[in-house]
Image: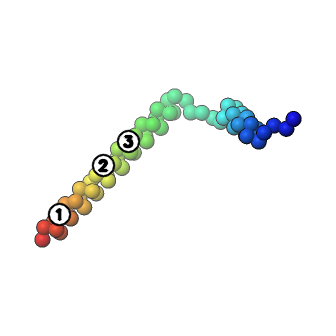
Amino acid sequence: MKKLKLLTDIQESYTELRYRTSWPTKSQLIKSSVVVLIASVIIALIILVMDQIVDHLMHFIYGL
């Protein structure tokens, strides 16, 4: 009996995830997470500063 395409795809995906994928170690995962967290905070601070500059500039222009 011919397998359904969906079942074949699920089985192939499982096999690939289980046996062919290299998963990071716990320490690699933590280091990567810290890098992403720091980068996110830096980008958020840059956006905050830019927003404050534009806000002050708009208040100055509309105050003329």
* Mark 3 or 1, closer to the camera: 1
State how far apart marks 3 and 1 are (Cα).
32 Å
Q: Secondary structure at mark 2?
A: helix
> Is 5 or 46 nearer to us in this picture?
5
Q: Are marks 3 and 1 in contact (CB under 8 Å)?
A: no
Seen in the picture, residue 25 relative to 49 is either above or below; the reply is above
Q: Residue at x 87, y 35 (%)?
A: 1
Q: Mark 2, residues whose alpha carbon is within 10 Å: few (<14), some, or many (≥20)?
A: few
Q: Please report whichever mark, 3 or 2, sits nearer to the chain's N-terminal start.
A: 3
Q: Which residue is mark 2?
A: 45
State how far apart marks 3 and 2 are (Cα).
11 Å
**Image quarter hosting the C terminus:** bottom left
State how far apart marks 1 and 2 are (Cα).
21 Å
Q: Is residue 16 shown to the viewer in this render?
A: no
Q: Which residue is mark 1?
A: 59
Is residue 63 left or right of 52 when viewed as pictured? left
Residue 25: % across, % down: 55, 30
Q: Residue at x 17, y 63 (%)?
A: 59
> Is 57 or 35 nearer to us in this picture?
57
Q: Are marks 3 and 2 in contact (CB under 8 Å)?
A: no
Residue 50: % across, % down: 28, 57
Q: Residue at x 46, y 32 (%)?
A: 30
Q: Please report whichever mark, 3 or 1, sits nearer to the chain's N-terminal start.
A: 3
Can you tell which quarter of the image residue 51 is in?
bottom left
Q: Which residue is mark 3?
A: 38
Return the residue found at the far bottom: 64
Mark 3: amino acid: Ile
Can you tell which quarter of the image residue 14 is in?
top right
Return the residue found at the far top: 26
Mark 2: amino acid: Leu
